[in-house]
Image (spheres, rainbow, N blue to C red):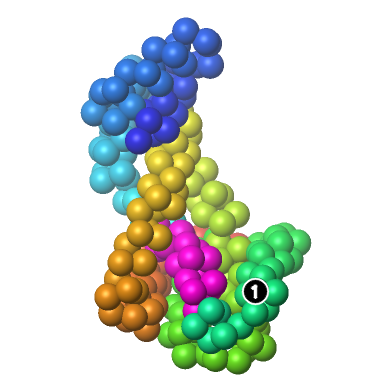
Amino acid sequence: AGAGGSGGGITSVGLSGPSIFVYSNNPLVANGLIGITPASQSGAPRSALALFWHAPRLRLVYIVNILLAAAWDLFMFSTPIQGSANHFSASTIGLILGSFSFATFVIRFAMPMLSRHFGHWQIILAALGVTACGFLLYPFLQQAGGVMLLAFVLGLALGASQPNLLSLLFESAPEGRMGEVLGIRLTIGNGAQALLPMLFGAVGAKLGWVPVFVLLSAFLAGGVVLVWKDGIHAAPHPS
């Protein structure tokens, strides 16, 4: 939680050593309870929580970021378990994870070309849709080749989402609040990495993996609706 407050302090007062120490170690600032906003921006939301709730476009970016981070974490967490249940060897599980990682690497090279033809929200919409459909299939695949192919497709989708989410953060951030905006994103990401694997493991152990993937797929489909309504239609298309 300190990342959001520290980012706000750095954005507002600069990068001097004493300032960083004071703001990053103040628990009220670190938890977003005290907003640090320059006087010239008194009309902007003052705290991290207010920044989240009163900036609709920014809030949408954070919601999508949470959904895609959850999808990424679920894939990475469940793949070794699913592979073991399907009697895959350790090397096969490694190849599946490697296919996913390789796809996230490959898609970054294609991103400049994609960005010339599609807007950020269009790419995010595609990433959410492909991931939602892929998660409906993933728990039912039992052949290593099929799992590896789907892992590659999921890697393309999730890998394409990250640079576009960062671009949308820069576009949606209030003037002078970029440090705080990135701090909130970092806080959300670290929280997801800490909590979601435990949640997925608990639900998976109780109900099995199919309900976990279906539930997250439903949330991703909801993200598609949100992006279509509040992202695509409200954003200018690239010329």
Looking at the rendering, the stretch of residues picked out in magenta corresponds to 66-82
- In the displayed structure, 17 sits above or below 69; it is above
The residue drawn where x is 46% and y is 80% is 135
The residue drawn where x is 56% and y is 57% is 162
Question: Hey, which residue is sitting farthest top in the picture?
Answer: 18
Q: Is residue 232 visible?
A: no
What is the quadrant of the C terminus in the image?
bottom right
Q: Is residue 170 visible?
A: yes
Position of 216 with respect to 92 (left or right) is left
Q: Is residue 201 magenta?
A: no
The residue drawn where x is 28% and y is 79% is 207
Q: Main SS type for the magenta part?
A: helix
- In the displayed structure, 96 sits above or below 230; it is below
Where is mark 1, residue-wise?
Answer: 90
Position of 102 with respect to 51 (left or right) is right
Between 45 and 27, the one nearer to me in the picture: 27
Position of 106 with respect to 4 (left or right) is right
Position of 37 with respect to 169 (left or right) is left
Between 180 and 42, the one nearer to me in the picture: 180
